[in-house]
Image (spheres, grey):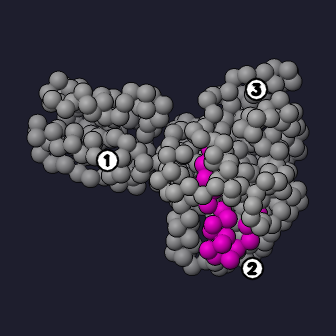
Amino acid sequence: MSIQKWNASQVAKKVINNEELFILDVRNADAFEDWKIDGRRFEYLNIPYFELLDGIEEILPEIPSDKEVLVVCAKEGSSLMIAEMLAEAGRDVAYLAGGMKSWSEYLEPIKVGDLTGGGELYQFVRLGKGCLSYMIISEGEAAIIDAVRFTNIFTSFAEQQNVKIKHVFDTHLHADHISGGRHIAEATGAAYYLPPKDAEEVVFQYTPLVDGTTVQIGASKIDVGAIYSPGHTIGSTSFVVDNKYLLTGDILFIDSIGRPDLAGLADDWVGDLRVTLYKRYRELSDELIVLPAHFMIIDELNEDGTVAKRLGDLFAQNHGLNIQDEEEFRHVVTDQLPPQPNAYQEIRQVNMGKITPAPDEQTEMEIGPNRCAVR
């Protein structure tokens, strides 16, 4: 029977298109339980590859013959070996090129909507890490918000769209992934913006991103307005784009709210978080479409693969926006937090410019699921 080599893009399409897939994950059980390829209609079997070295006959009855089967491991080698064994046993099977490493790094660009005067807004969905980046395009110019470290993806996309990157923003100093923002700015000559309250220890030049900062993209004058919205970090800043979209960074998600503890200051920042969510955001239009910098669960994806929802709907449905008692809110966001992101302290150091790990080290630092939210 046949063996196919699938890339992360092919798997992403199956996630977004809500297709069926059976995944045989041959990583260790703890790695699988911590982080896997999520799909609404995916089924899973986790058997560490070393348990299959003597043969796969015992698991054959558990592997469907009427569904597509994908074998997954950490970096590819083990999944290819097991896929070959399954093929020899008469099964059609695929394996994931580059393993979970490639899945962690893949971004799917999806158009969110049109802007005034012919502009466009794109969301770059990093399915394997839950990161969301954005590109605003208008009449030959572009702005990027919360770019991840794979800078060539953004610069190549800009070239395809025949636009010049003029502005690059980070809503805050990220702790769960390495930012590509300043590197894109250096490569393109764009201005790089960072909230100064998050930038006290950075060792590079930047343009201060403060409350009320407004830039215009292209001749069609797409306004990108900054709103100081602390709580996840002390400098966290949101954006209103074209009076239509609210980019919330890691302050507000579709299914949760941002955690305040990644700089070790949860007790200090929880009050800021509540003011942002319960006062500043309440002053905004319910019709704004919320576009966060992360998602936590696959159910947060819309049918087209985007992660977006009306602010008014979140006020009604998001539990984190409906805790009226301040002490209960403090308890929820300081005492019920998930594990902190992998290597988050080192990632903060990278994003400050203080250390520059090799690419393989950066990959290892980012391995694992998104953990920016309160459960």
- Identify the element where label 3 is drawn: helix
Question: Residue 262, image x and y in percent?
Answer: 71, 38
- Disc 3: which residue: 334
Label 2 or label 1, whichever comes before in sequence order: 1
User: Which numbered tag is attached to residue 307?
Assistant: none
- Disc 2: which residue: 219
Q: CA distance from mark 3 to mark 1?
A: 39 Å
Find the magenta span and give its range: 176-193
Kind of residue at badge 3: Thr
Q: CA distance from mark 2 to mark 1?
A: 47 Å
Of residues 286 and 331, the one nearer the viewer is 331
Question: Residue 265, image x and y in percent?
Answer: 80, 35
Question: Residue 325, image x and y in percent?
Answer: 86, 21
Horizontal side, residue 277 vs residue 169: left or right:
right
Question: Residue 307, image x and y in percent?
Answer: 60, 47
Of residues 108 and 147, the one nearer the viewer is 147
